[in-house]
Image (spheres, rainbow, N blue to C red):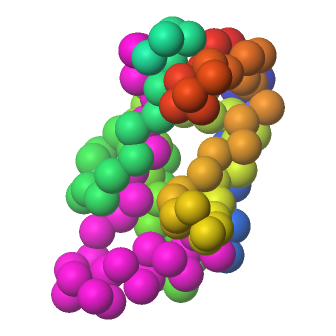
């Protein structure tokens, strides 16, 4: 795993966070974490949350994406984006550290 490169967040992802916060009237950050689990060993946990003291904070136009210190090495060099397709809309992660993912697409190994 590469430890030097922080993850990047696309303008489209920051724009979607702004839309969510405007609709809710709150100013939450998008938390992206890597947890053990799933059929391949790891899975992403993406949710709205408040930043913690040990978080890496990625910010643009007042919107924030936060990554806890344990997840940071697993997300080195990753790109966090937002995708809207016919089948649905979701935040996506293009992670160069992933060696394989499962058929369901929700878990991965490194």
Residue furthest toward the left?
25
Is 93 rendered above or below residue 104? Answer: below
Could you tell me if residue 63 is visible in this image? no
Q: Give the range drawn in magenta.
A: 12-37
Which residue corresponds to the image point at 33% horizontal and 52% vertical from the top-left? 47
- Residue 35 magenta-highlighted: yes
Residue at 28% of width from left, 68% of height from top? 28
Query: What is the total number of numbered labels drawn onto the structure image?
Result: 0
Q: Residue placed at 35% from the left, 78% from the top?
A: 20
Residue nearest the observer in this picture, 15 or 3: 15
| Front residue of this view, candidates 48 and 57 | 48
The reply, left or right, for residue 46 in relation to residue 108 is left
The C terminus - image quarter: top right
Residue 45 x, y percent position in the rendering: 39, 38
Q: Nearer the viewer, residue 35 or 103?
A: 103
Q: Position of residue 93 (x, y in %)?
A: 64, 46
Q: Which residue is drawn at 54% across and 57% down?
A: 91
Q: In which quarter of the image is residue 84?
A: bottom right
Left or right of residue 10, residue 46 in this image:
left
Query: Foreground residue, 93 or 83?
Result: 83
Lateral position of residue 12 relative to residue 90, left or right: right
Q: Is residue 102 above or below residue 4?
A: above
The quadrant of the picture occupied by the N terminus is top right
Residue 85 x %, y %: 64, 68
Residue 24 visible, this orientation? yes
Q: Where is residue 25 in the image (x, y as percent from the top left)?
A: 20, 87
Relative to 21, is 68 above or below?
above
Residue 14 belongs to the span the image colors magenta: yes
């Amino acid at each position: 795993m590469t430890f030097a490169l922080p993850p990047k967040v696309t303008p489209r992802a920051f724009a979607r966070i702004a839309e969510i916060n405007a609709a809710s009237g709150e100013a939450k950050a998008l938390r992206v974490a890597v947890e053990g689990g799933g059929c391949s060993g790891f899975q992403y946990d993406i949710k709205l949350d408040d930043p913690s003291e040990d978080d890496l904070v990625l910010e643009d136009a007042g919107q924030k994406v936060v990554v806890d210190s344990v997840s940071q090495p697993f997300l080195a060099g990753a790109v966090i984006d937002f995708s809207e397709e016919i089948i649905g809309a979701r935040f996506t992660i293009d992670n160069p550290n992933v060696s394989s993912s499962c058929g369901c697409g929700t878990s991965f190994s490194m």
